[in-house]
Image: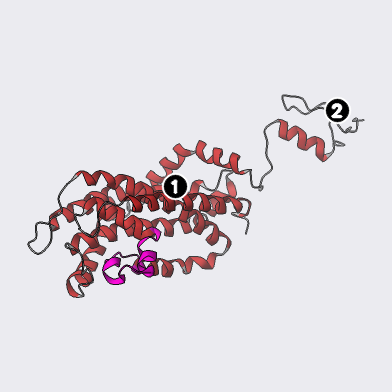
Amino acid sequence: MPIPSRPGRAVPADGELPEELGVFASSDDLRAVAEASGLRQMGVRPPLGEYIRSVWARRTFIRTLGNAKAYARNQGSYLGQLWSVLTPLLNSMVYVLVFGLLIKSTRGVTNAIAFIVVGVFMYRFFDSSVSSGARSIKGNLSLVRSVHFPRAVLPVSTTVTELATLAPAIVVMCLISWTSGLLPEYADVPITWRLLLLPPAVLLMWVFNTGCAFMVARWVAITPDLENVIPFALRFVFYASGVLFSVTHYAGHGPIAHLLNYQPIAVYLNLARSAVLDEPTIPVDGVMWIFGAGWAVLFLLVGFFIFWRGEERYGRD
């Protein structure tokens, strides 16, 4: 007959089940053996520090998954990867025609084409990151329910995909901006040292986007109906962030202007435009860089914490 388990009995260091543990072993004895073997209970949110280390350990997988999705995104079309550039380019042409040439909403800037092009390309980076992040859990439920891994891998990989997609688009954005300066009615867009500030501006925006992706991924996973609301919210942010017009020119310098100028999206558009354009009203501003770094760190930390809090619920609701 098996020997009943006794309280306080030591668990072997190698985690092997003691011979006297049998069908009469208590749940506490079995839990102690499992923990000594490095096993963890499924469906339980791990401690925050352990969770961060687990996500960091999968950084190579995140990068590979993100790049693979970026490459596969347009494989089913005839033009393939060219759509990564053509989509923001065609959007820019529409907005330049309607808002730059017909409505002339870009009063106060010396090169309307370059101003709108940089705004549209950079805003699309944010828009796509948030939209993809919102679907990162809901669109991968089979993977979430079948494989054990930190779910934060999924929203991060979506923003890596958008970053990889943005890389060739940035080149086209700069080329269009420089070319527009050759037109007689538009100010020159010279190539200067300020262009070196564009990569850090994009990196800060990517960090901010990742924080936003964490938030919407958690909210949509718990309340799927929110996915239908996000496009309307993004459209509102589009028109409130100075993508198509100069906030300073139309809002002046009062409290509302400061609120619009220093909200996150407007800050990152300002950083990108100050790096590419030669607009007198958009100089390189140290305060903007401080706000850009602050928004990025704040949203990443808050977004990651919000996402971690729902870890045990993903795939189960």
Q: Secondary structure at mark 1?
A: helix
| x and y, in percent, of residue 211 in the image | 47, 52
Q: Residue furthest right?
A: 1
Spot the residue most to the bottom: 103
In primary-sequence order, the first of circles 1 and 2 is 2
Residue lying furthest front in this view? Answer: 254
Q: Is residue 95 left or right of residue 260?
A: left
Above/below status of 176 relative to 34: below
Q: Position of residue 32 (x, y in %)?
A: 77, 34
Point out the frontmost of discs 1 and 2.
1
Q: Position of residue 292 (x, y in %)?
A: 38, 52
Say whether residue 43 is left or right of residue 294: right
| The C terminus sits in image quarter | bottom right
- What residue appears at the point 69 percent right and 42 percent down from the top-left corner? 41
Q: Would you call the spot at circle 2 few (<14 residues within 10 Å), some (14-19), or many (20 or more)?
A: few
Q: Nearer the viewer, residue 199 or 166?
A: 199
| Residue bearing mark 1 | 157
Report the amino acid beneath label 1: Ser
Range covered by the magenta-colored residues? 239-264
Residue 158: x %, y % from top left: 43, 51
* Residue at (59% x, 40% y) in the render: 49
Q: Quick check: is 259 in the magenta stretch?
A: yes
Q: Give the residue at mark 2.
A: 20
Q: Quadrant of residue 18?
A: top right
Tell me the tag on residue 298.
none
Amino acid type of disc 2? Glu
